[in-house]
């Protein structure tokens, strides 16, 4: 009877030790996992910030180019007031022709 009680007590202690090892392993895993997630989030945020900066630079360059093109187009198309009137007249004729159709 004493042997059975001792065996039972030994098994309970072993089970408790095993449970504690499992809990410790899980706690360590959770700690490492949180650290890994935090590190990856920081990396992601850095990459996101870089890509946003690049996108902003590209957008600004595009706006600058579009403005330059617009200005150069304005300069090339509007050379004299007579040409402006002539162009307006042509457009007016096209519109009137289209209205008749």
Image (spheres, rainbow, N blue to C red):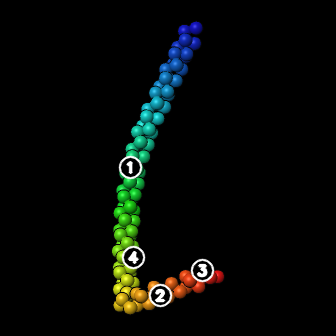
Q: Nearer the viewer, mark 4 or mark 1?
A: 4
Point out the tag, 4 or 2, that comes first from the N-terminus: 4
The residue singled out by tag 2 in the image is 89
Going from the N terminus, do you reach mark 2 or mark 3 first?
Answer: 2
Camera-side residue of 37 and 99: 99
Judge from the rendering whether residue 63 lies leftward or rightward of residue 18; answer left or right: left
Vertical order, 34 against 18 (above or below): below
The label number, if any, that marks residue 39 in the structure image: 1
Location of residue 80 in the rendering, given as x and y in whole percent from the top left corner? 35, 90
Nearer-the-camera pick, 100 or 2: 100
Q: Helix or strand or loop: what does disc 3 sit on?
A: helix
Q: Is residue 51 visible?
A: yes
Of the two numbered discs 1 and 3 on the same chain, state the one appearing first in sequence. Answer: 1
Depth check, mark 2 against mark 1: the one in front is 2
Q: Residues within 10 Å of mark 3 (few under 14, many from 20)?
A: few
Q: In front of the other: label 1 or label 3?
A: 3
Secondary structure under badge 4? helix
In the picture, the disc for residue 99 is 3
Q: Position of residue 85 (x, y in %)?
A: 41, 88
């Amino acid at each position: 009877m004493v042997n059975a009680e001792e065996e039972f007590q030994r098994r309970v202690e072993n089970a408790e030790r095993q449970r504690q090892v499992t809990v410790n392993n899980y706690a360590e895993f959770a700690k490492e996992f949180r650290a890994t997630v935090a590190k990856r989030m920081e990396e992601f945020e850095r990459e996101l910030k870089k890509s946003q900066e690049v996108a902003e630079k590209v957008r600004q360059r595009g706006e600058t180019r579009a403005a330059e093109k617009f200005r150069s187009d304005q300069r090339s198309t509007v050379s004299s007031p007579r040409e402006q009137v002539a162009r307006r007249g042509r457009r007016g004729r096209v519109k009137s022709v289209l209205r008749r159709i």
